[in-house]
Structure formats: structure tokens, C-alpha cells
Image (cartoon, grey):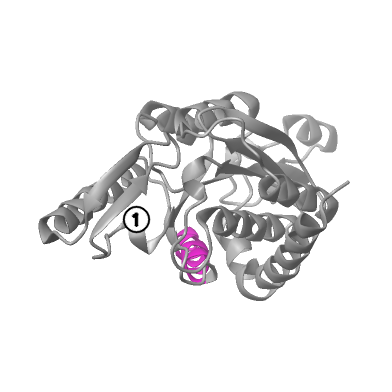
Amino acid sequence: MIPKELLRALRRIEITTRRLATEQLSGNYISGFKGQGLAFSEVRKYQPGDDVRTIDWNVSARMDETFVKVFIEEREMTVMLVVDVSRSKHFGTRGSQKSRVAAEVAALCAFSAIKNNDRVGLILSTDRVEKLVPPKKGQKHVLRVVREILASQPESHGTNLEVALQTLYKVTRRRSVAFLISDFFTSGYERALSLASARHDIVPVLISDPRDEELPDVGLANFQDLESGEDVLVDTSDPRVRAHYARAMGALRAQHVALFNKFGLDHCVVHTHEPYVAPLRELFARRAKRAHR
């Protein structure tokens, strides 16, 4: 039996994200994420300027006239949600926890996909694959995907995006759009990202909390690494400590962005204390604009 709290959370997310997908993202999603290939539509008589490679020689021989094959864009896609559910996601100082924001972002992408009759699949990962849901169509399936994210109780605490990307590469043979949703507190996934992005359209979505970027001045404070459990005592009243933290976190963010740019990946940053629709809408619109150039 599904706990009542989970059902209420699932219902709230369903109502909110389905409405947002319809009202604010639908057009940009369709424009920004085109079908992954061409499907045969019909044959017609050859016209000057047609590509000779599209001539259907069998039909032309039977009809004693030149005919060409006509192809249309195959709109149907596979959308994979690759969601990091490591312990660092249970962090949030303003607004919502990263885990909740990640679930809502994933739900919004999923509802946008099924409005376009696309298949949706899920990979939940820590430093191992916690759950794999094969892609299918339909609202019932999407609700199952969102429920799996909300109800996730990972057996491991760490983060290893290399494992998630290797799994995506191995289990999803057909080219897909893959939303990689994480706070990216990890490294060593460059080669896996390179291989996965050669086959799939990877879209990193970086979930960030204000305290990921700067420390508050609260004097001596005890900080715990949510993934390792290690405790560290920090004097946050020292401006040098706060400045060093800001530089280190800024450098880490820049490192990830440089990696995304290296592989030509569209990405966006979603903050826990700000509405998540705006950066996603801007991402979709940016892709749509580029597709129509």
C-alpha cells in the first residue's frame, strides 16, 4: 500500500507539473526536442531539384516513370530521466530540498514528453544504479516514474555519475533525450559523459542551493557531509574561510559548465529557492531558436 503522505505529494506534483507542462512548456518542448530520425511517408513523381538518392527504382520501373521516396520527421522520442538520489539531495536551506526540486523538474520533463506522445524511462542512481524503469508511454506510466523518485530510499549514499551514464549508454540503444538531474557534487565522469553524449542528447540540469555557493557568518559551526557522514568544525566568522569556500565552489561549478560546453551540451541551473520553470523554459526556448536557424 502506498503511504498517504506519498500519495498527497504525488498528487500535488502531478497537478502542478502537468499544468505547467501544458501552459508554459508545451510549444518550446516540441520545437526544442525534435524527433530522432526520418520515417518513410509516400512516393511521388520526381521533380527537378529532388535528390537522386531518394529515387525509388522499383516503383519507377513498374510505373515507367521516375518516382522518389518522401520522408517525414519521426516525432516520437524516448526521454530518459537520469536522477541523482544521493544523500546530498536531502539538503536545502531556503525553499525546498534538492530532492523535492529534482522530483518536480523530472515530473515536468516527463509530462511535457507524454503530451508529445513520447516514451519516458527512469534511472535512479547514487554510486550505483538504485532503480531502472524501462521507457513507456502514457500518464499512468509517468505517475509511476514520479512515484519511484519520491519514494526512493537508496541503499547507498554516495554519488557516481559515471555509473549512471554507463547504464544509460548500455541499456538505451536508440538515441534518446536524457535529462541528467543532479547537484554534480562528483567528478571522474568525463569519459562516460563523452560516450553517452555521442549516442544520446544529454541535457544536464544542475540543482543548486544558495549555501552551495556561499557560507553564512554564524561563527563556529559543525558541518556534516551527508554522503560520507564526516563532521567538520568550521569558523564561518573568518572572512578568509568564507572567501575560500566561495572560490572553491565557484571553481567546481565552472569546471562542470566547461565540461558541458566541451561536449556541446545544453544545460540549465535550477535553484532550490527560485521557481524552476523559468530556467527550463529558457533552455527549451534556446534549443528551439537554434533549431530554426
Q: Is residue 21 above or below residue 55?
A: below
The answer to whether residue 95 is seen in the rendering is: yes
Instruction: Tell me residue 119's x, y (percent).
Output: 73, 45
Q: Residues within 10 Å of mark 1 (few under 14, many from 20)?
A: some
Looking at this rendering, what residue extends furthest in the top direction? 170
Name the residue rendered at 53%, 64% in the picture.
96
Name the residue rendered at 50%, 67% in the picture.
285
Instruction: Tell me residue 212's x, y (percent).
Output: 34, 55
Q: Which residues are magenta?
A: 278-293
* Membership of 85 in magenta stretch: no
Name the residue rendered at 75%, 69% in the picture.
15
Instruction: Tell me residue 77's x, y (percent).
Output: 68, 46
Callout 1: helix, strand or loop? helix
Looking at this rendering, what residue extends furthest in the right direction? 1
Q: Amino acid at mark 1?
A: Asp
The answer to whether residue 70 is seen in the rendering is: no
Quarter of the image for residue 269 reads bottom left
Quarter holding the C terminus? bottom left
Quarter of the image for residue 56 reads top right
Instruction: Tell me residue 275's x, y (percent).
Output: 51, 72
Q: Is residue 191 above or below residue 121?
A: above
Which residue corresponds to mark 1? 212
Say how many tags the image has. Answer: 1
